[in-house]
């Protein structure tokens, strides 16, 4: 088990490889569809301040407001692939050191991870209550009114947030590997068999 | 006798659906974990899902933050007004959102504005069914009602798919062998995106709409049931076995558990069309049924 503290420098991230189990601590920012579009279409200095050296968490949380403070109730990862058109630009422009989500991402993001020294960490989808417990404090929120609760950029302080490195800064990609192996098996299963009349 | 106010019972139905993993789903995940190698990532992930579900139930927190699309199936006797029931359900949905049992999930498709309370055009979705035969319609007075709620998140909905046979790319013709190819292809395409291990609801036949409806309706079944149609029952069993050889595994990390179950329904089609619809449900297969009988509500998940 490896520990990553945010903000992280390049050498800490370069030390991660596919398959590493990590616990992340420090301040990270949630961002999903509306936020990624916004971050690419704008050059937001406030966002840059919190994102530099930090990680983006693909998450649209359930948030309760209790006595004036926000509390994360349920906060698992959302599918990362939807941010593929934006992520490489976001990583480069804002100096992000990691993306946390689920399902993995595409070639452009993998390339940005390599050139910028960042990693993709996979959280377990649907592990929403346990992951919310690793959020110690909501430090702030950007674009809440405009984007709504799930899409807002929540600035959160986490302790020992569990994830697995599935895309690293050296070009390693577990998703491509599983996809390739399962495609081979699919090919075998689709081979014509007796009684299979085909088209 | 006025129609009873079931709003609080509907709120409780929503709370349970969002925070209590159905017993059959928990049992299937437990069995899957036992089937994975000791010390494997697959096994660890499956066990963490059970740990998460236990924490969710204990704290009344949503098992998954994507509390999804709300689909109610309400079966009732002749005394109930459907309009009144729908009003009560909508009030319960707004209340459940206020109490953080649901994430605000209704977004205006044109403006992108989130309604903030899960209410909107077509949200929530409510289907009504009669609980009486034709001859009994007149003399039944709102004494019995059952409501099943299904919560289905966006990640799994996005990997759901509909095929039109024949499909040359898959070499899938207009017979069950062709359907089998669609099922394998759909799960391979889904990889871990739909939060594997998923459960498939499959609709064969119908038109584009009813084929998808048939697929979704299969998700109202329990994982441990047996299809009354022996052919479909055999196809379901075979599909689970084959799909679990793909090696995609929990979350797409690799492993022996790619699906928890496959449920198939079929309906007649027109000669020109042959649709196969696949509704992918994530591992967090959330559903609950409320039964109202003689003034008392009971819940089963």
Image (cartoon, rainbow, N blue to C red):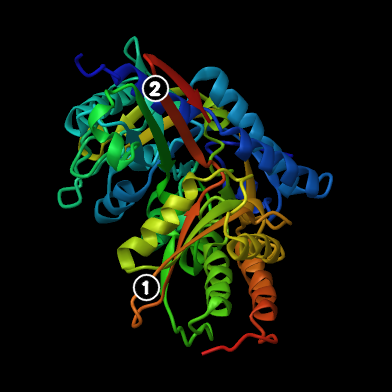
- Extreme residue in the top direction: A67
What element does badge 1 sit on?
loop
Q: Nearer the viewer, residue A147 or B65?
A: B65
Question: Distance of mark 1 from mark 2, alpha carbons?
Answer: 36 Å
Q: Which residue is mark 2?
A: B292
Q: Chain of mark 2?
A: B
Residue at the image position 43 percent from the left and 51 percent from the top: B217
Q: Position of residue B24 (x, y in %)?
A: 62, 38
Q: Position of residue B163 (x, y in %)?
A: 42, 73
Q: Nearer the viewer, residue B236 or A9?
A: B236
Q: Quadrant of residue B237?
A: bottom right
- Dots 1 and 2: beta carbons under 8 Å? no
B74 vs A136: above or below: below
Residue at the image position 23 percent from the left and 31 percent from the top: B138
Q: Position of residue B11 (x, y in %)?
A: 35, 22
- Would you call the spot at circle 1 few (<14 residues within 10 Å), some (14-19), or many (20 or more)? some
Q: Say whether residue A91 is visible.
A: no
B41 vs B47: above or below: below
Q: Nearer the viewer, residue B73 or A135?
A: B73
- Extreme residue in the front direction: B135
- Would you call the spot at circle 2 few (<14 residues within 10 Å), some (14-19), or many (20 or more)? some
Question: Which mark is on residue B269?
Answer: 1
Q: Position of residue B193 (x, y in %)?
A: 52, 56
Residue at the image position 47 percent from the left and 45 percent from the top: B220
Q: Quadrant of residue B101?
A: top left
Q: Nearer the viewer, residue A3 or A81?
A: A81
Q: Are marks 1 and 2 on the same chain?
A: yes
Q: Say whether residue A90 is visible.
A: yes
What element does badge 2 sit on?
strand
């Amino acid at each position: 088990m490896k520990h990553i503290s945010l903000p992280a420098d390049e050498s800490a991230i370069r030390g991660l490889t596919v398959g590493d189990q990590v616990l992340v601590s420090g301040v990270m920012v949630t961002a999903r569809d509306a936020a990624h579009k916004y971050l690419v279409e704008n050059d937001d200095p406030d966002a840059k301040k919190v994102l530099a050296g930090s990680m983006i968490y693909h998450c649209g949380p359930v948030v309760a407001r209790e006595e004036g403070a926000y509390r994360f109730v349920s906060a698992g990862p959302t599918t990362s692939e939807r941010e593929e058109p934006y992520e490489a630009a976001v990583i480069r422009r804002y100096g992000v050191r990691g993306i946390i989500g689920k399902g993995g991402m595409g070639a452009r993001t993998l390339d940005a991870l390599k050139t910028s020294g960042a990693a993709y960490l996979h959280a377990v989808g649907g592990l929403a209550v346990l992951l919310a417990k690793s959020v110690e404090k909501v430090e702030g929120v950007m674009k809440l009114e405009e984007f709504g609760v799930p899409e807002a950029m929540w600035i959160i302080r986490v302790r020992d947030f569990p994830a697995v490195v599935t895309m690293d800064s050296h070009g390693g990609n577990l998703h491509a590997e599983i996809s390739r192996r399962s495609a081979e098996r699919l090919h075998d299963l689709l081979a014509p068999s007796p009684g299979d009349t085909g088209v | 006798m006025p129609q009873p106010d079931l709003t609080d019972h509907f709120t409780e139905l929503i709370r349970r659906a969002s925070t209590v993993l159905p017993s059959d789903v928990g049992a299937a995940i437990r069995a899957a974990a036992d089937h994975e190698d000791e010390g494997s990532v697959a096994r660890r992930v499956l066990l963490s899902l059970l740990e998460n579900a236990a924490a969710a139930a204990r704290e009344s927190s949503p098992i998954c933050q994507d509390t999804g699309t709300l689909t109610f199936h309400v079966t009732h006797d002749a005394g109930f007004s459907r309009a009144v029931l729908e009003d009560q359900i909508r009030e319960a949905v707004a209340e459940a959102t206020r109490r953080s049992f649901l994430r605000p999930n209704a977004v205006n498709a044109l403006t992108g504005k989130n309604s903030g309370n899960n209410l909107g055009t077509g949200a929530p979705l409510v289907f009504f069914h009669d609980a009486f035969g034709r001859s009994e319609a007149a003399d039944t007075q709102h004494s019995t009602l059952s409501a099943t709620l299904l919560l289905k998140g966006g990640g799994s909905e996005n990997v759901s798919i509909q095929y039109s046979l024949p499909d040359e790319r898959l070499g899938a013709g207009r017979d069950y062998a062709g359907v089998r190819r669609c099922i394998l292809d759909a799960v391979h395409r889904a990889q871990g995106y739909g939060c594997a291990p998923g459960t498939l609801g499959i609709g064969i036949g119908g038109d584009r709409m009813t084929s998808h409806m048939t697929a979704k309706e299969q998700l109202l079944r329990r994982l441990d049931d047996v299809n009354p149609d022996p052919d479909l029952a055999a196809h379901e069993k075979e599909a689970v076995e084959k799909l679990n050889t793909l090696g995609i595994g929990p979350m797409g990390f690799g492993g022996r558990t790619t699906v928890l179950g496959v449920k198939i329904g079929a309906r007649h089609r027109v000669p020109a069309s042959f649709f196969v619809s696949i509704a992918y449900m994530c591992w967090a297969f959330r559903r609950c049924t409320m039964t109202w009988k003689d003034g008392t509500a009971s819940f089963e998940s």
